Image (spheres, rainbow, N blue to C red):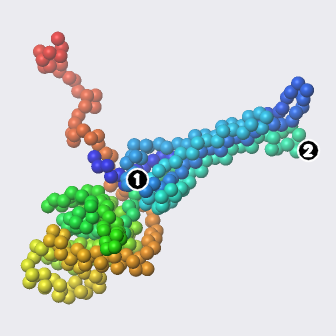
Amino acid sequence: MTNFIDYVKIYCRSGKGGAGCMHLHRAKYLPKGGPDGGDGGKGGSIILKGNRNLWTLLHLKYQKHIMATDGGKGGQSRSFGKDGEDKIIEVPCGTVVYDGETGAFICEVKAHDERVVLLKGGRGGLGNWHFRTATNQAPRYAQPGEPAQERTVIMQLKVLADVGLVGFPNAGKSTLLSVVSAAKPEIADYPFTTLTPQLGIVSYRDGRSFCMADIPGIIEGASEGKGLGLRFLRHIERNAVLLFMVPATSENIAKEYKILLHELEQYNPELLTKARILAISKCDAVDEKALKKLKDSKALKGLDIPVVFISSVAGTGIDELKDALWTELNKEKNQVIEISHAPIDITAVEREEPEAKEENEEEGTIYLNEVEEEWDLDKYKGIGWDE
């Protein structure tokens, strides 16, 4: 089971407010002391807090219920009830929260130590001391506390990175990330080697750097659920620049680029407004004549985006690629990355998030009492356990 969890569904409930006290003061020498009921305490709130040291929602995976405590009741002598304790949920920066029933966007946490009140605790009720008047000097009633708020929420992590890698499986994305950064993604010659997003810090000139995100490859028809679907595309929504990668060995590079662009448009049309660079990878796998033909291709020039020819294995074109990415990242139009979080389709999201199996549980394992069957115990005699 992977430790990278970018989706959780949690039931949250704030604390209800404490009831105000209805009390009339009585003392030996003060038989009619009047009302002195205190106020109830405030219920605890559910608060989200950004934490830059977290990179996954794993710590919330098995917390199905998060509840704050209720406020205490008021007491006599105008004693206030105890406030309920707030429940603070620490989440990685880039966490987006949706309503678990409707899929509507609620809030997002983008900065370290940023706090967002998800559910507000109920206010405490007023004691009867507040309701005394000249014509009602002994009110025999007090306010109840406000009820708790409850909600089922879906939290999705959308990682924060400057550059997002987009390409088909085995386009060389993980190899590039391993070359330009200290990240060590799994690299192999079979499709979907990368199963979870990978982040790497790319060093640039004069001690400068930027963050690059590698997501699992997408294929034609991903918007219809093929391959790994579009589940991980949420992690490039915040990127300033999208780096498309197509191998030089592909039959039609321009066509593959347009297929990738179409799948992104099906997921979120706003992704098409981001700056784009096309990297032709695995240039070491073709001869010089074929490479020159690619560079002079009218189809590539007609795409109207910067095209860089690279080989992560041979190390050619890497510096040129870094320069192109840095130039795009520092353009003023790419500085502010604002995205609108559209409501999510609850049925589609939950279909993509199957329940995780126990680490040691194998497919098809049958346990006792799971099936109704007459067990023939005679055939087990003689092996020592019945002696």
Q: CA distance from mark 2 to mark 1?
A: 59 Å
Residue 134: which disc? 2
Contact? badges 2 and 1 (CB < 8 Å): no
Q: Is residue 28 visible?
A: yes
> Height in image: 343 above or below 277?
above
Element type where label 1 sits in the image: loop
Tell me the kind of residue under disc 1: Leu
Q: Is residue 329 above or below residue 179?
A: below
SS at badge 2: loop
Q: Is residue 230 visible?
A: no
Q: Is residue 136 left or right of residue 334?
A: right
Q: Which-is-in-front pick, marks 2 and 1?
A: 1
- On screen, residue 43 versus residue 311, left or right, reads right
Q: Which mark is residue 166?
A: none
In the image, residue 327 lies at what x, y percent? 34, 79
Residue drawn 25% across the image and 81% down it: 307
Q: Is residue 60 placed above or below 366 in the rendered structure?
A: below
Q: Position of residue 135 (x, y in %)?
A: 91, 43
Name the residue carrying label 1.
54
Q: Is residue 307 above or below residue 202?
A: below
**Neighbourhood count class around disc 1 (C-alpha, 10 Å): few under 14, some 14–19, many 20 upward:** few
Task: Tell me where residue 75 appears, x and y as whole percent.
Answer: 74, 34
- Front residue of 287 and 103: 287
